[in-house]
Amino acid sequence: MKIIAVHGNGGGSTRFDRVSSHFPASIDFVAVDLPGFNGVPVDPSLRDVAGYADHLAELIDQHRGPDPVVVLGHGIGGSIALDLASRRPDTMDGLILHAPVGADLDTRLFPKVMSTKPVRELIRWMIAARPLRPIWRRLFFPIGAPNANIDTFFEGYRTCASFGQMFEIIDADWFESLDPVRELPVTLLWGEHDRVLKSGQTDAIAAKAPNAERVIEPGWDHFPMLEQPEEYAHVIAGLADDLVASTSH
């Protein structure tokens, strides 16, 4: 089996660096980078979520082999993967949505704050700023992770050219327009203590994947792939196995 992981906003494939070595040999784990993230050039033709989703389909094709493919999307990576599954479910054999962005975008405070470009650029700069890093470290990583990985995480925001665009294209209108994913097996995954995208959003996301299994992991915050990589790999591997098994019955 192949698991293709899609990162959240401000980051890139490096967010999964601590995870890959913990998967069993039967799983080929591949983390990809979207345009405008982790040094990948911006693609000016990508102007909506569907465009990024179709680009993700191309990345999946590049890594496709004879084995089933499960897509793991975290944050905005989950949003883009959900869009792809909604329109082109044949591009994957299963989908794990880990705290995807999409629920309550018209009522939550943070999306409203990020509605203008100057504010988005200011927030991006602040997250990347080295003097503020001790504050962000406590906020984003309450459990803890190695300093080298944390520094890579925050530096990702400094060069993330598509950070602001995600707040423009992933909005309530986009989410409302999505057709529900009914045939493809889907798992909705959330950390019980996620403070970035709270697990209470699961119900709203489930409206777009009505047959999905819901999994709330105790002890997880928003970035368990960095804080608890071995446990994260174990959980993801198990969920992917279950998704693939469900398609063979």
Image (cartoon, rainbow, N blue to C red):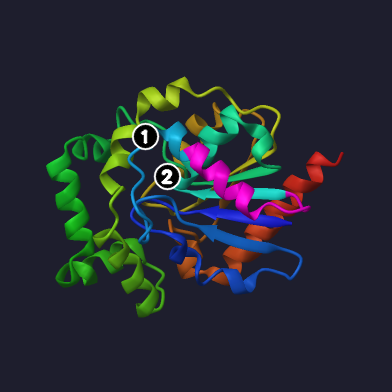
Outermost residue toward the bottom? 147
- Residue 146 coordinates in the image, percent (x, y): 40, 78
Image height of 190 relative to 40, above or below: above
Is any atom of residue 12 visible in this view?
Answer: yes
The residue that mark 2 highlights is 76
Q: Is residue 200 magenta?
A: no
Percent of width and height locating residue 46: 38, 37
Q: Looking at numbered disc 2 in the image, what kind of residue is underneath it?
A: Ile
| Mark 1: secondary structure | loop
Query: Magenta region: which residues?
Result: 53-68
Q: Could you tell me how far apart the alpha carbons at marks 1 and 2 are, in whole angstroms?
A: 8 Å
Residue marked by disc 1: 170
Q: Which mark is residue 29?
A: none
Residue at 22% from the left image edge and 34% from the top image edge: 112
| Residue depicted at 36% across the width and 26% down the height | 172
Q: Is residue 58 magenta?
A: yes
- Secondary structure beneath dot 2 equals helix
Q: Is residue 71 visible?
A: no
Dot placed on the residue nearer the N-terminal end, 1 or 2? 2
Q: Nearer the viewer, residue 201 or 1?
A: 1
Classify the position of the N terminus by image quarter.
bottom right
Q: Position of residue 141 (x, y in %)?
A: 36, 66
Q: Quadrant of residue 128?
A: bottom left
Q: Is there CB contact under 8 Å for labels 1 and 2?
A: yes
Residue under the image location 79 percent in, 42 percent down: 246
Using the image as rendered, state which of residue 225 and residue 7 is in the foreground.
7
